[in-house]
Image (spheres, rainbow, N blue to C red):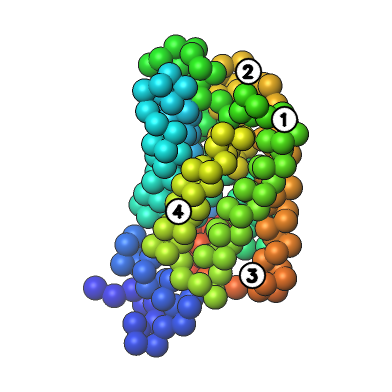
Amino acid sequence: MSDPHLPSPQALTHEGRARYRAWLAFGSLDEFADPRLAYRRLFAELLGTFLLVLAAAGGGLLHARGEVSLAAAVVAPALTVLAIILFMGAVSGAHLNPVVSLAFALRGDFPWRRVPWYVLAQLLGAALACLFLLGVFGNVEHLGATLPGPEYHPWQAFLMEIVLTGGLVSVILGTASAAQNVGTIGALGVGGYIALAGLWAAPVSGTSMNPARSFGPALVAGDWRAFWAYVAGPLLGAAVAVACAWILRGPGGDSAARAAATGTLGQAVSHPD
């Protein structure tokens, strides 16, 4: 059974290969590009962020209780992100992070009109994850909130979050470009970076790199200490990453990057939203 909208596998461009992979996985691309089905993208962002924050905040909570090691607490969310990108990155792009949505939009790879909805879905997913943790454990250990380490100040966490998020968003933008492979390579790159950043920098800032990840525990536990550092730091870090991407690869907007950012895995469709 073939799709008349797709080119033959023997003559595929970057865009064609993306469309072919999407057809193999999901069938009709028109269905996934239909704006009436935007709820699928938003649900994917909500579910993905729920799973990410469940692993990240849950790991932080259990580490604070002495029940898992620091290595386990930082590797668990990294592996979770890797799995999420693989199993539903083609649906929404698996941003899972407000600053990633903003970075893709700044690069011209993601429609600005979708950004507020993605951010709302991500924040809701994070809050639901922490409500789950509250129901299981009670309001203990700040529900795994990202806070500066005992020996560090909020401004130090702020600076660390700028650098760490700049690296994370650079990896995301780089593996989503036409110059690199997307899909499995992107999942490994992003998951690997999150694990490595956590292994060395978690004692300083908790390695949030994601305002939604910090928002969930702060909201549900009611602990907003140093929260500004986990919003301002990632925002500035993402801006630095976008600037670096422009220097390294020029303007955004290539077909592979749009495919990775929007989750449609192909742009030659009648409904861009």
In this rendered view, identify the residue nearer to me: 146 or 203: 203
Q: Position of residue 39 (x, y in %)?
A: 48, 44
- Do the numbered discs 3 and 1 sit on residues whose CB atoms are within 8 Å? no
Q: Nearer the viewer, mark 4 or mark 3?
A: 4
Would you identify the image quadrant in which residue 242 lies?
Answer: bottom right
Name the quarter where the C terminus is drawn.
bottom right
62 relative to 51, above or below: above
Identify the residue position indicated by label 1 in the image: 154
| Measured Cα–Cα span from mark 1 to mark 4 | 26 Å
Q: Is residue 42 above or below residue 2?
A: above
Indicate which disc, 4 or 3, sits on the residue closer to the N terminus.
Answer: 4
Mark nearest the camera among 3 and 1 is 1
Q: Residue at x 72, y 56 (%)?
A: 240
Residue matched to label 4: 192
Q: Earlier in the sequence, mark 2 or mark 4?
A: 4
Identify the residue at horizontal 75%, vertical 34% (top origin): 155
Q: Camera-side residue: 33 or 172?
A: 172
The residue type indicated by label 4 comes to Gly
Q: Return the residue at label 2.
A: 223
* Mark 2 closeness class: few <14, some 14–19, many ≥20 residues within 10 Å: some
Residue of label 3: 253
